[in-house]
Structure formats: structure tokens, C-alpha cells
Image: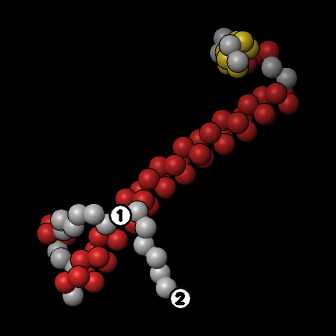
Amino acid sequence: MATITIDGKEYDTDKLSDETKAQLGSLQYVDSELARLQAQAAALQTARIAYGRALKETLENGSAPKQEEVAVEGLGDTIQFDK
């Protein structure tokens, strides 16, 4: 017997209506997609930081260092692009 707990109340999933099971499936799908997108956002944020550091190094020294040489501190959270 599988159960789901919502607001402290347990429900037997075998006794749920087809419509309720569909809603539960949709909720599980959305939760899974949100987790996937959050992981993707974290990876993209990491890449953004690396690109920002390489950009800063290029602007300050004329070229980006090799990856093992990157040690730029204080990039900050904001970079503005002038149009």
C-alpha cells in the first residue's frame, strides 16, 4: 500500500480516483522538472561566473589565462553591457 501525505493527512494511493491520480502524476512531473531546471540553473550560474572571470582577466591583461591560471578575485554579481 503506497501512501501520500498532504498537510499531515495520509491517503492510500490505491484508493484514489483516476482524476486524482492524474493530478498526482502531474504534480510529480512538475516537481521533477523544477528540480531539473534548478540543477541546470546552478550549472549555468557556475559557467557564468567562469566566463565573467575570464572576461575580467581579458579586459585587465589583454588575454585570458589558461584555465589552471585563473585566480581572479572580486568579480561581483553584476556586469552591465552598454548598448
Residue 22 left/right relative to 1? right
Left or right of 67? Residue 79 is: right
Q: Is residue 10 above or below residue 71?
A: above
Which quadrant of the figure has residue 76? bottom left
- Residue 70 is left or right of residue 21, and the answer is left
Residue at 66% across / 41% down in the picture?
29
Q: Say whether residue 74 is visible.
A: yes
Q: Residue at x 42, y 59 (%)?
A: 45
SS state under label 1: loop
Label 2 amino acid? Lys
Say which amino acid is labelled 1: Gly
15 or 70, nearer to the observer: 70
Residue 78 image offset from top left, x and y in percent: 43, 67
Mark linked to residue 83? 2
Q: Residue furthest left?
A: 69
Where does the image place residue 57, in percent across and percent down from the top left? 24, 77
Residue 43, compared with residue 52, is above or below; it is above
What residue is rendered at 23% in x and 82% in y?
60
Q: Reply above or below: 77 against 16.
A: below
Q: On residue 3, which mark appears? A: none
Q: Which residue is mark 1?
A: 76
Residue 37 location (% of width, % of height): 55, 51
